[in-house]
Amino acid sequence: MKQKQNRRKIVVAVTGASGAVYASVLFKKLIAIKNLLDEVGVVFSTNATGIWDYELKDPFKAMAPMKVYGKNDFYAPFASGSSAFDSMIVCPCSMGTLGRIAHGISDDLITRAADVMLKERRKLILVPRETPYSLIHIENMRTVTLAGGIICPATPSFYSKPETIEQAAETVVDRILALAGFEIEAYKWGEAQS
């Protein structure tokens, strides 16, 4: 018998890196597993909304059960370590955001929330979508990893033979959700698929 999962409170931040499709697929997956969620807080950087419109040509609409916070709303509950938010996903994560997180520069709600996750030893998952990496990028990823964060590059897998861009993005999103501790139906290498 599967053990019942506790309902989770998570933060999802979307930054101005290319790859809005990853965030779009992530939001759709979170809606599909809303029974596992108590609360989802969402933050967009200034550049993220422009990239979203350019790449997806689909204006973002806040979707229940998610609440969207302003990028400078330091009164958001997850801006404090006293909140009960247990995980944060930054998807996609720009290299500028990653660098600020790596060096403790909390100049907006995204970087402050990430700082809270690290200092409270909670789960922080950064999903960079950049190639190639410079040594500065690699060192910043190393710093975040040493501080307890998880770097999950937006690198699709092809074992499941995805046929659309969304299906390729889903291979990354499924890994992100697994890293965040969710047990979801997803392709697993070597397992029979229904």
Image (cartoon, rainbow, N blue to C red):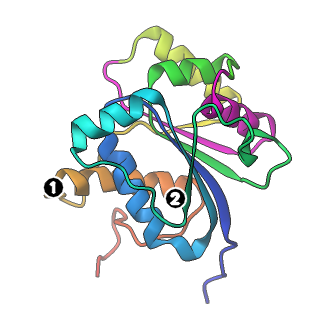
Residue at screen point 69% across, 23% down: 106
Which of labels 2 and 1 is toward the front?
A: 1
Q: Position of residue 185 (x, y in %)?
A: 41, 72
In whole angstroms, how far apart are the C-alphas of marks 2 and 1? 22 Å
Residue at screen point 47% across, 16% down: 137
Q: Is residue 56 left or right of residue 34?
A: left
Can you identify the residue that label 2 sits on?
178
Question: Which badge, 2 or 1, is on the more N-terminal residue?
Answer: 1
Can you identify the residue that label 1 sits on?
164
Q: Establish if 67 lies above or below 111.
A: below
Residue 124 forms part of the magenta stretch: yes
Q: Amino acid at mark 2?
A: Ala
Along the line of sight, the residue nearer the viewer: 193 or 96 = 96
Residue at screen point 37% across, 29% down: 17
Q: Establish if 183 lies above or below 98.
A: below
Q: In what element is the residue under mark 1?
A: loop
The residue positioned farthest toward the right in the image shown: 82
Residue 66 forms part of the magenta stretch: no
Q: Position of residue 55 (x, y in %)?
A: 23, 38
Residue interval drawn in magenta: 107-132
Task: State which quadrant residue 46 falls in.
Answer: top left
Residue at screen point 33% across, 41% down: 20
Q: How many marks?
A: 2
Q: In what element is the residue under mark 2?
A: helix
Q: Amino acid at mark 1?
A: Thr
